[in-house]
Amino acid sequence: MPALERPPTRPVEAPAHPAATAGPFDANGLRVLDRAECLRHLGATTFGRIALTVGALPVVLPVNYRLVGEQIVLRTTPGTKLDTAANASVVAFEIDGVDPVAHTGWSVMVTGTAHVVEDPAALDRCRAAGVPRWAASGDERFVAIDTELLTGRSLER
């Protein structure tokens, strides 16, 4: 499957935010996170939201997940909206962390192809990663999302 092209980005220095850590900033003054920082955030959390299309309409679903290698892996049940819509579809996946008192936070967005994991060795890695279920029971199916397009922003003081 060909790799998706990354959209062009034009980070700029943000002189309006001198207290923020060094690094590129976007036009809104948010610090642009590099790929390694985005992957660290993805590896440190286990709850996110997946955006996909169901019946030609956008749907955003909360999901538990684990980062396995550089893929986002979640569990679902065969026949669910997620299972049906995510197979070989382009989806968006988002996580964030917010401190409402300090008015700081970060957000990581992934756009990638979702596919049902069928390879026996990959299934073993998914099981070993301990991907939690959202629902309490049912047959399991693992869906993996590639992280070709990975972006993140941070609002800092």
Image (cartoon, rainbow, N blue to C red):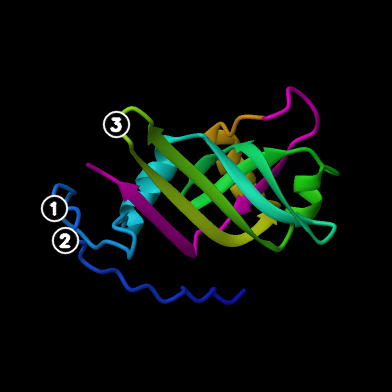
Report the quarter where the C terminus lies: top left
Q: Does the magenta stretch include residue 145?
A: yes
Q: What residue type is labelled 1?
A: Pro
Q: Is residue 129 above or below residue 36?
A: above
Q: Which amino acid does label 2 sit on?
A: Pro
List x then y, in percent, for residue 89: 70, 62
Disc 1 element: loop
Mark 3, Cα crowd under 10 Å, few <14 / some 14-19 / many 20+, is: few
Q: Does the magenta stretch include residue 70?
A: no
2 and 1 marks in contact (CB < 8 Å): yes
Mark 1, Cα crowd under 10 Å, few <14 / some 14-19 / many 20+, is: few
**Label of residue 102 in the image:** 3
Instruction: Kindly tell me whether residue 47 is visible in this rendering.
Output: yes
**Label of residue 15 in the image:** 2
Mark 2, Cα crowd under 10 Å, few <14 / some 14-19 / many 20+, is: few
Instruction: Kindly tell me whether residue 116 is visible in this rendering.
Output: no
What's the distance in space between the residues labelled 2 and 3, CA to CA?
Answer: 21 Å
Q: What residue type is labelled 3?
A: Ala
Q: Is residue 119 above or below residue 124?
A: below
Occupied quadrant, residue 52: bottom right
Residue at screen point 40% across, 35% down: 98
Occupied quadrant, residue 40: top left
Residue at screen point 33% across, 48% down: 154
* Span colored in magenta: 134-157
List x then y, in percent, for residue 103: 33, 36
The residue singled out by tag 1 in the image is 18
2 and 3 marks in contact (CB < 8 Å): no
Residue at screen point 82% across, 42% down: 80
User: Which residue is more in the foreground, 47 or 24?
Assistant: 24
What's the distance in space between the residues labelled 3 and 1, CA to CA?
Answer: 17 Å
